[in-house]
Image: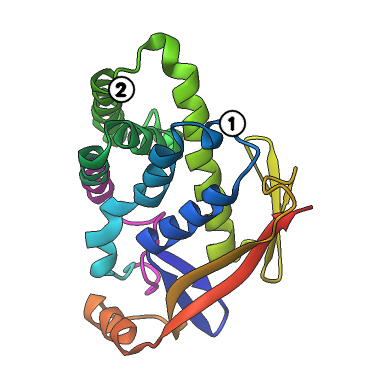
């Protein structure tokens, strides 16, 4: 769950909804060569499905007992995250083995800061094993890994740009050679990845009061009572 703190309210956006926005952004990118080739469909599938393992977690949001805030995608126990990535990779791989490998690569990348943490050692060995097995079954050999890495760049870019917009992060961020800055509801990116086009951004969320919540039942009741809200804006080159 993305928890956007708007001072008096929290805007909650599920990880799968953020991933759908990621796909829309990647679909508009014109500067990454794999998106112009035969791998385009697989890249878009992997981008759309990269957080599908969070579906069950976000369906039953929880409260961080230390703060009384809803748990976001950065918090929560390690075992829950380990399980959801196994689930998400398997789901993507059922549709497309290479897409499953791309989701596995994403898990390895975004949790790279956990390397060296004993509680995460089995996570990396397991996910790397799944990725390599899927690549082998998809016919991707060592000589093809540069192509795979180029495909993954696209997934990573979509995830990063979408997270910046959904979270309302205004500090400029650099990802794989692109600099993105959110000004109001416009995400400005340099160099321009969209070939001069303006990309419409839309994602659904639920807005609840920004306060301390006593327990999981209370936060779930607040979300159930909230009217869905569309967060909208644009992305363009600068």
- Relative to 13, say whether 223 is above or below: below
- Is 74 contained in the magenta span? yes
Front residue (pair 111, 131): 131
Q: Rate crowding at label 1 as few (under 14), some (14 to 19) or many (20 or more) other CA atoms within 10 Å.
A: some
At mark 2, the secondary structure is helix
Say which residue appears at 45% left-offset and 68% top-offset.
3
Mark 2 lies on residue: 135
- Report the disc number at residue 33: 1
- Looking at this view, is 41 or 206 the one in front? 41
Q: Is residue 76 magenta?
A: yes
Kindly tell me whether residue 171 is visible in this rendering.
no
Secondary element at tag 1: helix
Residue 46: horizontal and vertical position, in percent?
Answer: 38, 43
* Vertical side of 127 occupied by 194: above or below: below
- Left of 53 or right of it: where is 117? right
Q: Using the image, determine if residue 18 lies above or below residue 95.
A: below
Q: Badge 2: how crowded within 10 Å, few (<14), some, or many (20+)?
A: many
Label 2, label 1: how many angstroms apart (C-alpha)? 20 Å
Using the rendered view, name the quadrant where residue 136 is placed.
Answer: top left
Residue in the image at 47% along x and 33% along y: 152
Residue 135, percent across and down? Answer: 30, 22
Q: Nearer the viewer, residue 36 or 149?
A: 36
Q: Does residue 153 appear left or right of residue 217 in this picture? A: right
The region drawn magenta spans 66-86
């Amino acid at each position: 769950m993305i928890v956007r703190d708007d001072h008096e309210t929290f805007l909650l956006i599920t990880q799968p909804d953020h991933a759908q926005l990621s796909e829309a952004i990647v679909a508009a990118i014109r500067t990454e060569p794999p998106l112009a080739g035969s791998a385009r469909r697989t890249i878009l599938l992997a981008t759309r499905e990269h957080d599908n393992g969070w579906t069950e977690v976000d369906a039953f949001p929880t409260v961080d007992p230390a703060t009384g805030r809803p748990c976001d995608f950065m918090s929560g126990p390690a075992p829950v995250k380990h399980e959801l990535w196994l689930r998400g990779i398997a789901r993507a791989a059922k549709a497309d083995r290479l897409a499953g490998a791309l989701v596995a690569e994403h898990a390895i990348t975004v949790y790279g800061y956990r390397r060296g943490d004993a509680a995460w050692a089995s996570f990396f060995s397991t996910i790397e094993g799944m990725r390599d097995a899927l690549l082998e079954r998809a016919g991707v050999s060592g000589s093809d890994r540069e192509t795979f890495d180029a495909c993954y760049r696209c997934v990573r870019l979509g995830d990063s740009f979408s997270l910046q917009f959904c979270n309302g992060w205004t500090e400029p961020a650099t990802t794989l050679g692109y600099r993105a800055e959110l000004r109001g509801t416009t995400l400005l990116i340099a160099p321009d990845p969209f070939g001069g086009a303006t990309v419409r951004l839309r994602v659904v969320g639920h807005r609840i009061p920004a306060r301390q919540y006593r327990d999981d039942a209370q936060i779930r009741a607040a979300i159930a009572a909230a009217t869905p809200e569309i967060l909208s804006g644009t992305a363009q080159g600068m």
